[in-house]
Image (cartoon, rainbow, N blue to C red):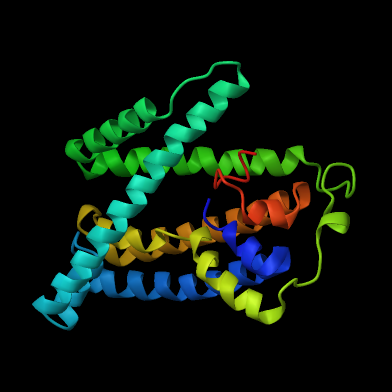
Amino acid sequence: MGWNYAAGKGGAFGALIACFVSGILYTCVATIDSAVTSTVASAGGPYAQAKNTIGPLMAFNVGLFMTLTYLMLNAGDVLVAGQLVQIGAQQLGHDIPWQPFTVFFLAILTLLNYRGVLATLTVNFVITAAAFLSIVILFIGVKPWAPGEVLLHKDLLTPLPYGWIGVIAALHFGMWFYLGIEGTCQAAEEVRSPGRALPLGTMSGIITLLIAAAITWYVACGLMPWEYIGWDATLAPLSD
């Protein structure tokens, strides 16, 4: 979700270019983060880095920015989670409101954070593994070895509809393929050997995201027109 607006701005190929350009930039961010955090092994992550490299005022600004960012991101996540439950129930013939499920997911996530970082990281790991496995199963299910049977890239893929200006507009949303990988460094205080664990965890994370991003683009753009993907009201083309 979120990455699909790249297709609306630049077409399917524009979204793919945005995916790879953002992937290169995020790989750089992940490398820098893991290197710096191995030295500044603090659970603060970016604002701990800002405090050690620039000073308290910069740490305050970075911390405030991160707080606002994650507040908005979490609100968006729980809203979409509640709406996806509603969509699933409607497909089973039940008409239920999404609001109670949004509150339920928010309560569960709050409880996890209250329980501590180990519980939160463990659940995140399980959710990520399940999501990645789902994408791989979907990839196998659409039979990529038989072009034209399920995937219709030949019919659906078009040249850049808005030219290179559309690709530039798509870059803003290409980041959503990788959003959150920079949060890995916030676990610096929780590992035995930051110098070993952080680079290994961060780079294996970015590799996972690069693979998942490519598969997600390939499947979604082979099943639906890019115009629909780019302006899908549910924000979740894989669900559709």
In percent of width and height, residue 8 lies at 64, 62
Q: Residue at x 60, y 66 (%)?
A: 19
Front residue of this view, candidates 149 and 199: 149
Q: Furthest-top residue in view?
A: 93
Task: Locate residue 165: give its quadrant.
Answer: bottom right
Position of the C terminus by quadrant: top right
**Residue 93 against residue 238 in the figure, above or below:** above
Can residue 41 be seen here? The reply is no
Task: Locate residue 159: give its quadrant.
Answer: bottom right
In percent of width and height, residue 232 lies at 61, 48
Q: Furthest-left residue in view?
A: 56
Q: Residue at x 28, y 52 (%)?
A: 71
In percent of width and height, residue 58 lies at 16, 78
Q: Residue at x 90, y 48 (%)?
A: 148
In percent of width and height, residue 93 lies at 60, 16
Front residue of this view, candidates 197 and 82: 82
- Residue 154 placement, left or right of 110: right
Circle count: 0
Front residue of this view, candidates 161 and 46: 161
Task: Locate residue 193: give its quadrant.
Answer: bottom left
**Residue 179 against residue 28 in the figure, above or below:** above
- Residue 91 placement, left or right of 118: right
**Residue 144 against residue 58 in the figure, above or below:** above
Can residue 87 be seen here? The reply is yes
Q: Residue at x 23, y 59 (%)?
A: 67
- Residue 23 placement, left or right of 122: right
